[in-house]
Each structure stands twice: as structure tokens, then as C-alpha cells.
Image (cartoon, rainbow, N blue to C red):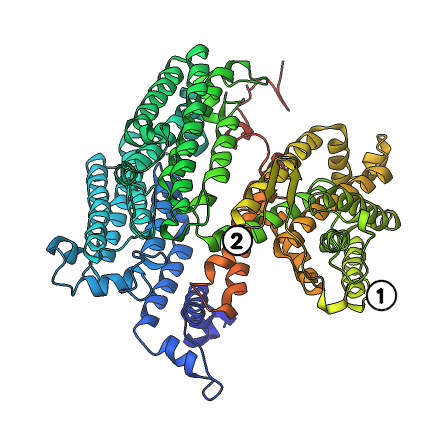
Amino acid sequence: MSASIQRRPGERLRDNPLVGRALGCLALSFVLALMIGKQEGTQQDFGLAFREAILGPRIVWFLLIGVLVFLLLTFGPRVQPYVHRPGIRPLAIGGLTVVVAFSLLKWTDSTVVSDGKFSTLSEAASKTGQLAPLARTFFTPPLPWVLFVVAFAVAAAAIVLRKAALSWVGVALSVLVGLWAWYSHSLVVSLLGTPDHSTGALVALLGFLAIAAACAATALSAEESANTRGFVNRIFAWRPGMPLVAVALVLGVMAFAIATWFSPSNQNATLVDTASLFSSTGLAPLAKAYLSWLGYLLFVLSLALAAFAAYRRDPRLAWGAAVLGLVSLVLNLVALYSISALGAKSAFDGANGPWDNLGTGGWLASAAFLLLAGAGYVVATAGRERGTIARTQSDVLAGIGKIPGMSKALILLVVAGALFYPPMATPFWQKVLVSEIGIYVLLAIGLNVVVGWAGLLDLGFIAFYAIGSYTTAYFVGALPIQPPEWMRLSPLLCIPIAIVVCLIAGVSLGYPTLRLRGDYLAIVTLGFGEIIRIVAVNNPGNFTNGPKGAFGIPTPAIHLGPIHIDWGQSSLQYWYLLLVITGLVILAFNRLEQSRLGRAWAAIREDEIAAQATGVNTRNVKLLAFAIGASTSGVAGVFFASQIGYINPDNFVLNNSILVVAYVVFGGMGSLPGAMAGAAVLTWLPEFLKDQVPAEDRQMWIGAVILLMMIFRPAGLVPARRRTAELHGFDDASSAETSAVPAGEGMGGTK
């Protein structure tokens, strides 16, 4: 008898791959149940957290997740054709957005509700008799989740079945549920009677609108497969500048209709309320006119002129829209300064000075005016862009050529966010922006030169960060050994000195390691980083003050005649100073990447021997990579030392070097925007997770995100074009297919 016949039934079941897959998925869901939640053990009962995780109804939901994963893995090939249908991506984004809003975000800032989360609020609101029946019904558990599941299921069915009628039903249902959630939240806020700046309801509304957009895309599209790149290109190519006008319209309506302009923690005053609040005060006439009627007029005129110029593609109208948008932006900032300065003068809400006690409305309006001015600029300059222009509809859909104004529009969106989002953030997030995100973005930009462009793995990059910080501490007189009085400098004047010192340190590291590659180079740089930290700990000659570090590092300041600027009052001031420096570094490095030196780095990264054979001076080019990357890290060290005011060797441990490498890899090696995006996301994520998961589990979740990123997007968040070509090629898959060959041609053909 054959071996297969002699197997016992139990052995056949055990060897069945479906059984192994099912057990693996259930084990995964079991581990997730242990990971997710705030259950923790005690020294007296180590099994407490384990029992709380699995002995309860919650384990059923996690087991259902395992079953869902098993079904996706098993029937994935059958589902695969539907994954690329039009509308599937906005459906996934919308569903994830609603889940985040219902599970993670706050729905109220009132202290009446303990944590402000949706589950806590819904439990309390459903039992509140004073609340309107419509809102009380919405918050009745588990109705919100049921409505979401139904809307998501209808949208998914519409995408799979390609039924237009079902798609429009999904649109109506999603919009209705989203508006119901928003209206119910507004009734709760009105009942509580306290200022509320929570984002849960708004994010949920946006998620349901995304699901509605997915259904609309399914109903209106006749294509079998979604072409996201072609869709985006078609939007930008239809009328250059029009996407900026659309975003500005949304921001402007929010700013002038519903957003808070003044006293967000007390009065919560909209623009109309602010005009009434300052009507009988000594506010400047221009600011008073702006609050009452001029702001509305400027927004309508700027919006209409920018939209008309974009639609007609008229350069003269476009320049007029750009000028009008900038003038409106200046007047908006003047009005914000006037009301905040007058409020601070009377110590309203305890304001300390201008720009205090402002809400989000004025900053949203500023972003809207900047985008309208940018739309005019994009339209006016779209016809003069150099490069290959996509001229046909097929080129646009395939992503071939350069879409006029697309890169400028994306840059303007980023600039508007960098300028006007930080004032709307809480003091905690403003501090995170400066002391973590801003500093690590600079470090990632510098390391990207070494790792991403030149291909030299550096695991001791944090050493240059330490050298820049200690150089600043020395020249400001914060170390035991102090410079002569005439050499004492402010932190801003320490920047060129830190650049030179770190540049020399980079060359000192690079020169002895010129012949090393790969893992050997990584080990040497790792040792260099540890040497710098241990030297700082051991305190040779009483220079570094050992583990105690440097105290009393002053904040940056400029005192030139009548100009007196001090950056030590708030994190927001540091952010704008850091933004200017980072912008200059980005401009310089962007030109550097396109230069002869940048191409030499790329050649060394791909094949050093071949680069040397073609005439590249590999020694000098590699030394320049170490020197330029190290100097950028020195600038980051200056800002870190002056912003924190205290440094010690524990700030420069090996773990920080590994993190910076992870930022570059996560964002996209060799991509300047990718390095910045990776640093921003991976420094924001731990802070966001502080209120979501126990501190002990935070790094585990970050590791899981990085693993998923490496699996599903190995080139990074914003990959470099060369890296994308290495993984997928420059052409679309369709263009790579072999075309038919006539019978009389090719191998074996006859003439």
C-alpha cells in the first residue's frame, strides 16, 4: 500500500495546509487580543493581564478577525480581480477613517465625559433624556457601528456587482449617516455648553464622504480596473491650479462660517462673534472692517478670480489672482495681530502677547488665501515649464510626461500646511513638532546623503548630532571649560562653527574607512558613535561635564539696533526658525542631487568599481558625502541644544542612530521628500500611541508598522524614482507585454 493510503485520518487533517493556515490565523488573533488593550499584570498575579485579555466577550471579536484573515488568504485569488475595481481605494480609506474616528479620536473635550472617546460618549448620550431623540438614537450602542458596517457593505457590494442603482443607494446612505453623526455631535456639544475642539465627528464625516465617493466612482466609471495615477493626473491636467482652488474653497468656507477665531477656550467666537466682541473696543479701523465685511469680500473676490483664471488659463488674470491672494493674506494676518494684541493688552483669558488666544479660523483663512495666490502663480507659469509635457489624454492616463503645475501645487499644499497648521495645534504637539519632528527631519535629510545617495551605511550618525550640540554648549559658555569672553556667541552664530566642526569630524571618519564597504563600514561607524558618547561620559579634562551634561544653554536671539528677536518664549517661534533653516537646506540639497556630484554619488551607490572606471574620484566623492551629511547633523545639534537648554550623553545613544536610519529607509532611500516623510511619520506615531496603547507596547506597534511597510511598500513612503524603477521598472506592465509578431518574421520565419 502507498504511504498516502497508510496515513491515519488524524495525520491527513494535520497535514492539510488549510488547517495549518486556520490555526495560524487564530493564533494571530489570539496574540492581537493580548497586544491590544490596557490590561496589565501585577507583581502579585502575573496571569491577570492574560485572563483579562481572553476571558471575556472581547476575545470573540479578535477570533473573528482571525477568521477574516483566513478567508482573505484562502479566497484571495478569487477576490484579487475585484481589488483593482474603481472605488476600492476610497472605500478602504473611508472605512479606515471611520474606524479611527469611532475607536481612537475624541468626540468631546468636556470633563463630563471621562476620556472623550466615542464609546464613552455614546454610552452617556444614549441615557441622557435632555438630548434630542434623533441624537440619542444615533448614539445608542451598537447602532453607529451597525450603520457603518451596512454602509461599507453596500458600497463593497456595489463595487463588486457594478450596479449603478446600488452605488447611488450607497452614496445616499453614506452621506446620510455621516451627516447624522455630525448633527448628533453638534447637539451634544450644544447640550454640554462648553467649547469643544474635538475632531472625531469631523473625521467620521470625512470617512463616510469617502465611502460615498467610492460609490459615486463606481457608478460613473465604465472601466474594469482603477487607474489612480491617471485619475490624479487628469485632475491636475484638466485645469492647472484648479485643485488648489478647490482646497482653498473648503478651507475658506470652514474659516469664515464655522471655525473659531478668538478665545477658543472661553468665548469660542466665530468670525461674526469676534466682530461683535471687538465692535466697541479700540481695534484698528482696518481690522474692524476686515472682521465685519472686508474678509468675506476678499475671500469671494480671490476665489472667483483664481477659479476664472484657472478655467480660462489666462496668465494676466492669474497674476492678478496671485497678487490679490497675497494682499488678502497680509490683511488677514494684520487683523489677527490686531485682535490678539488688543486682547493681550487687556489680559483677556490670560494672554501674554500678540498671536495668543487665537482659534483655527484665522489660520485656515490664511492657508486659503495662500493657496489661491499659489493657484494664480501655477496658472501663470504652467505654460513655461520645461520638460516633456503630457499632451494627449492617453499620456495623462498613463502618467507619461510632466503635468503642468502638478509639482508646484503639491509643494504649495505642503508649504501651506507647514506654515499654518502649527498655530492650530496644541502646545504639546507644537513642542513635538520642534523638539522631535523638526530636529529628526534635519537628521534624516543629512543621513539620506550618506545612506540614500552615496549608499554608505552609517550607524554612528548621531555622533555628529552630539558634536554639534556640545560645540554649541561650549561657545555659549554652558560647559565647565569656557571660551574667552570675546568668543562667546549666541546659538545662531554657533551654526557655522558647528557646521565646520562636524564637517571636519565627518572627513575624519570617512578618510580611514574609504576602503570599507557594507557591513564592515557599518560596524566602524557604529563604533565611532559609541566612542563619541563614551568620551562625553568619561569627561576628559573636565570638558563635557560627564553624565551631568551642559546646563543653561541660552535660546537663540537677534539684537541688531532696533531689531530684538528672542526665540525662547514658545515652541512655535522655534518651529518657524527651524522651518526657514530646513527650507534652505532642502533647496541646497535638491540642487545638489541634480548636480554632477549627486550623479557621482548615485554611481558609487550602484557600482563603485564601475564608477571609478568611468572617471569618478570615489575617494573625494565619498568624503564629501560624509562631510555634507555630518554638517547637516551639526545644524540639528545646535537647534536641539538651544531649544532644550540642557544636554547630556544619554541624548546621543545608539538607539537614536538606528532610528534615523529607520526614518530614511521607511520614507524611501535616496528620496529627499521620502526622508522627511519617514522622519515625520515615525516621530509622530509614538506620541500618538501614548494615549492609545500601554507604554511597554508602543515600540512593538511601531515595529509592526515598519514590517507592514517593508512588505507592502518596500521602496518607502515616497520612493525615489530610481528605486521604484529597480522594483517595478519605468514602464507600465501593459507596455512590457510582448506584442504579436507576423508569421514571416522572427525566429524560423521565411522570406
Residue 234 shown left or right of residue 198 in the figure: right
Q: Which residue is mark 2?
A: 431
Residue 65 shown left or right of residue 145 in the figure: right
What's the CA distance linking mark 2 and mark 1? 34 Å
Q: Which residue is mark 1?
A: 540
- Find numbered disc 1 in the image and state the secondary structure of the residue it sits on: helix
Crowding at mark 2 (Cα within 10 Å: few <14, some 14-19, many 20+): many
Determine if residue 714 is in view. Answer: no
Q: Earlier in the sequence, mark 2 or mark 1?
A: 2
Determine if residue 260 is in view. Answer: yes
Q: Quadrant of the C terminus?
A: top right
Residues under numbered marks 2 and 1 in contact, where contact means CB atoms less than 8 Å apart = no
Disc 2 marks which amino acid?
Answer: Lys
Q: Position of residue 721 (x, y in %)?
A: 61, 34
Q: Position of residue 162 (x, y in %)?
A: 27, 37
Disc 1 marks which amino acid?
Answer: Pro
Q: Residue at x 58, y 53 (%)?
A: 435
Crowding at mark 1 (Cα within 10 Å: few <14, some 14-19, many 20+): few
Residue 441 shown left or right of residue 231 in the figure: right
Q: Position of residue 321 (x, y in %)?
A: 42, 18
- Find numbered disc 2 in the image and state the secondary structure of the residue it sits on: helix
Residue 472 shown left or right of residue 228 in the figure: right
Q: Residue at x 39, y 43 (%)?
A: 83
Instruction: Give above or below for 313 relative to 700.
Output: above
Q: Quadrant of residue 34?
A: bottom left
Q: Residue at x 48, y 75 (%)?
A: 6
Front residue (pair 269, 191): 269
Instruction: Give above or below for 223 relative to 582.
Output: above
